[in-house]
Image (cartoon, helix red, strand yellow):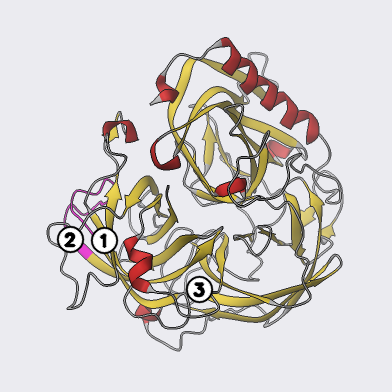
């Protein structure tokens, strides 16, 4: 891949310039939500590349940690990514880490666009926490002689939204929140929860783990706005059909909610509630859980982060994040698509080719617990089911086949696949469309050879899926749970 080649002086300069730019733009106090970073680029133009970097909002996803070998910092805060397709550079920034209220760049480097539009990210410099020789806390740069490989991103046309997976971190959805919702006519979205580690039914949790038998798995919402006021109406939250019961979460959010949209670090974000509720302002401030929702321009991708603002969760006895704000999803948030106006042609959906990621959130059950996993994936381009997979009669009409990419030094390595397609070790049967764009009877078959399969055997589990179009291309988001852990699959139609 291009990201494995030594950096030219031009690319080094671009990466460091982008890192400095992000730091300068965002070096202000986090709690002043009306002041923040937004991209200097225009909104999605339907297919042409942006000129200059695009800033994306990314929610916290369970498993995202930052460490230098002897110090571990949980990234239990939302982040931004600046991606410059024209200049071939990127940076990752977090907010509220290690007691700081401002912005902190974590990684910066170069990107190369490969087969089927896949962005391979090479880390040129990262900022390691708390490793100063004099014992002072802070973040200190560490540079690489050649870019560190293993990070990937996908973008829609015009850099409207996408997906990113940094090496050592789970996949996160991206949305360029370049503008606030601007329609008094409600837009209906369907969403799935971004899961956190599986926990035993009835045990304590709330934002730090997910119980599919009692907490939201998927749902729908109507979103309308008047000025800066954003209203969420007809919020429906449902549990996984495969777990039985009433389908209604034990703890549901209200059927409607009100928030406000304004420029922030993350773009034009809707905060629920707004403004943030702060107890004991100052160094030891306590912030109420607040959902942060970013929506792409013209009815694009919806991304929700449901954690509290700027809560630090690190090793050394610091308490974990507080319960989440259950506005849409449970777990750590939600990702959603505009609901199609009519039923999709499922045959056309599964006939398309996709790139994406398969994320397993792990579990707190058992000893030792199961760690999360996240892998770059390709679907479409295969016609035969993986060995051992046996779907019901009629499968194929609604079945997507694909899998992860070959591994190199423990990392996903698409360069080992000359045709740009991954392994044939995974399958998703969407089943019957329950309502436009919603498949509540989906089935996932995991082959024995899939890199994230901890059982070593082929097996199936039930799931729900939502599908729709973003910028004229299909997107599919799947959520399910087997006996070991939750699974989320995010797919975007590729070039």
Which numbered mark, 1 or 3, is in the foreground of this view?
1
Quote the CA–CA distance across marks 3 and 2: 27 Å
User: Marks 2 and 1, Cα distance to the nearest angstrom?
Assistant: 7 Å
Element carrying mark 1: strand
Q: Earlier in the sequence, mark 2 or mark 1?
A: 2
Q: Magenta span covers which residues?
A: 445-459
Q: Which residue is mark 3?
A: 218
Q: Looking at the rendered structure, which numbered label has been put on residue 163?
A: none
Q: Is residue 64 left or right of residue 363?
A: right
* Callout 2 touching callout 1 (CB < 8 Å): yes
Q: Is residue 448 magenta?
A: yes
Query: Residue 350: horizontal and vertical position, in percent?
Result: 33, 64
Task: Please tell me which of labels 3 and 2 falls first in the chain.
Answer: 3
Cα separation, mark 1 vs mark 3, equals: 21 Å
Foreground pick, 424 / 459: 424
What residue occupies the far bottom of the structure in this picture? 246
Q: Where does label 1 land, which residue?
A: 427
- The residue at which mark 2 appears reads as 385
Q: Quadrant of residue 71?
A: top right
Secondary structure that dominates the magenta span: loop
């Amino acid at each position: 891949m291009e990201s494995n080649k030594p950096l030219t002086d031009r690319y080094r300069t671009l990466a460091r310039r982008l890192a400095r730019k992000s730091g300068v733009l965002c070096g202000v106090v986090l709690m002043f939500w009306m002041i923040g970073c937004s991209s200097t680029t225009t909104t999605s133009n339907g297919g042409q590349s942006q000129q200059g970097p695009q800033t994306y909002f990314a929610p916290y996803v369970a498993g995202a940690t930052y460490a230098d070998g002897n110090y571990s910092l949980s990234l239990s805060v939302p982040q931004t990514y600046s991606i410059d397709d024209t200049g071939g550079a990127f940076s990752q920034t977090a907010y509220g880490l290690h007691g700081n209220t401002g912005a902190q760049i974590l990684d910066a480097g170069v990107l190369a666009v490969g087969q089927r539009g896949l962005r391979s990210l090479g880390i040129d410099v990262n900022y390691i926490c708390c490793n100063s020789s004099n014992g002072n806390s802070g973040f200190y740069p560490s540079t690489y002689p050649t870019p560190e490989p293993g990070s990937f991103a996908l973008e829609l046309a015009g850099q409207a939204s996408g997906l990113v997976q940094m090496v050592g971190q789970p996949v996160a959805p991206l949305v360029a929140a370049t503008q606030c919702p601007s329609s008094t006519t409600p837009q209906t979205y369907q969403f799935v929860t971004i899961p956190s580690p599986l926990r035993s039914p009835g045990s304590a949790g709330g934002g730090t783990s997910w119980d599919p038998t009692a907490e939201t798995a998927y749902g729908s919402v109507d979103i309308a706005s008047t000025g800066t006021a954003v209203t969420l109406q007809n919020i429906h939250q449902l549990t996984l059909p495969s777990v039985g019961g009433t389908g209604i979460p034990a703890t549901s959010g209200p059927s409607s909610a009100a928030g406000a949209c304004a420029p922030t670090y993350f773009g034009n974000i809707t905060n629920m509630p707004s403004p943030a509720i702060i107890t004991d302002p100052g160094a030891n401030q306590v912030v109420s859980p607040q959902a942060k929702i970013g929506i792409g321009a013209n009815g694009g991708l919806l991304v929700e982060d449901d954690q509290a603002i700027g809560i630090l969760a690190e090793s050394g006895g610091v308490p974990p994040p507080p319960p989440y704000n259950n506005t849409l999803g449970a777990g750590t948030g939600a990702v959603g698509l505009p609901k199609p106006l009519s039923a999709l042609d499922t045959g056309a959906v599964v006939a398309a080719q996709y790139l994406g990621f398969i994320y397993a959130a792990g579990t707190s059950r058992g000893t030792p617990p199961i760690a999360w996993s996240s892998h770059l994936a390709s679907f479409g381009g295969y016609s035969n089911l993986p060995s051992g997979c046996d779907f019901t009669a009629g499968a194929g009409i609604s079945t997507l086949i694909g899998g992860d990419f070959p591994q190199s030094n423990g990392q996903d390595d698409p360069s080992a696949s000359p045709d740009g397609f991954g392994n044939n070790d995974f399958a998703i049967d969407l089943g019957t469309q329950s309502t436009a764009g919603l498949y509540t009877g989906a089935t996932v078959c995991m082959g024995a050879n899939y890199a994230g399969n901890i059982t070593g055997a082929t097996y199936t589990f039930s799931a729900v899926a939502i599908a729709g179009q973003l910028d004229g291309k299909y997107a599919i988001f799947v959520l399910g749970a087997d006996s070991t852990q939750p699974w989320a699959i995010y797919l975007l139609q590729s070039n």
